[in-house]
Amino acid sequence: MKLRGLYAITDSQLLAGRFLSHVEAALDGGVCLLQYRDKGDDAARRLREAEGLMKLCERYGTQLIINDDAELAARLGVGVHLGQTDGPLTPARALLGRQAIIGSTCHANLDLAVQAAREGASYVAFGRFFNSVTKPGAPAASIELLEQARAQVKLPIAVIGGITLDNAAPLVAHGADLLAVIHGLFGADSAQEVTRRARAFNALFAS
Ligand SMILES: Cc1ncc(COP(=O)(O)OP(=O)(O)O)c(N)n1
Ligand SMILES: Cc1nc(C(=O)O)sc1CCOP(=O)(O)O
Ligand SMILES: [Mg+2]
């Protein structure tokens, strides 16, 4: 499966009261990967929500990724995204199998990406590229770093952090494969606007 296009990431606060409707609107507009990102510790709610997303993803032919939690990903038979403090990649790969999509946060560090590739990551993620409402304290990354990564890393590259329709085009032009977006997608007031934004993000990959 080609990893290229919009990578939509959920946010439980931002999507409160409109969780499935906004996610379905995004899927309707086209989503390559959907990440369930919930930083809460209510395991029953997390399982219920992830199962709900899995059903939606199956309907739209989208791959579901669980943030942080390889055990939950294994339980659902889906992929996982791991940050530098979320546990090592090698056991996650052993747990989830060869086919699973496993992503790795590399901040602005090429060495981390080379290591992630060696340990079996499916894609590497760099960020944050712009000011992020969701995660203002994330370390900053630059277009120059993205260019270097494109030249050195053979895996698909996800970019993240403050990405909107107004600032995404240069990231694609400099080698990003996946635009990972929370607020710039789900911050929309209506489901129709979420769908429009999803289509517009994907259109950036058309040429
Ligand atoms: C696609 C993508 N890239 C980066 C992250 C950030 O992961 P992490 O550093 O583990 O931070 P949290 O998201 O867990 O707060 C991500 N989730 N997805
Ligand atoms: C979860 C996350 N990780 C980041 C990183 O740089 O690693 S930035 C970020 C937040 C992404 O949300 P938004 O699109 O609203 O800025
Ligand atoms: Mg994490």
Image (cartoon, rainbow, N blue to C red):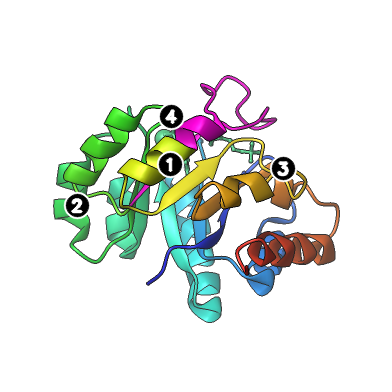
The label on residue 125 is: 1
Range shown magenta: 123-146
Say which residue label 4 marks.
107
Q: CA distance from mark 4 to mark 2?
A: 21 Å
Pinpoint residue 61: horizontal percent, then vertical percent: 49, 77
Q: CA distance from mark 3 to mark 2?
A: 34 Å
Tell whether 120 sits left or right of 173.
left
Residue 130 covered by magenta stretch:
yes
Look at 67% across and 73% down and name the residue there: 28
Which of marks 2 and 1 precedes in the sequence? 2
Q: Is mark 1 within 8 Å of ligand 1?
A: yes
Q: Residues within 10 Å of mark 4 (few under 14, many from 20)?
A: many
Say which residue label 3 marks.
167
Q: Is mark 4 within 8 Å of ligand 2?
A: yes
Q: Where's the N terminus, which quadrant?
A: bottom left
Which of marks 2 and 3 precedes in the sequence? 2
Tell whether 70 sits left or right of 129.
left
Q: Amino acid at mark 2?
A: Arg
Q: Amino acid at mark 3?
A: Asn
Which of marks 2 and 4 precedes in the sequence? 2
Say which residue label 2 marks.
93
Q: CA distance from mark 4 to mark 3?
A: 19 Å
Q: CA distance from mark 1 to mark 2?
A: 17 Å
Q: Residues within 10 Å of mark 1 (few under 14, many from 20)?
A: many
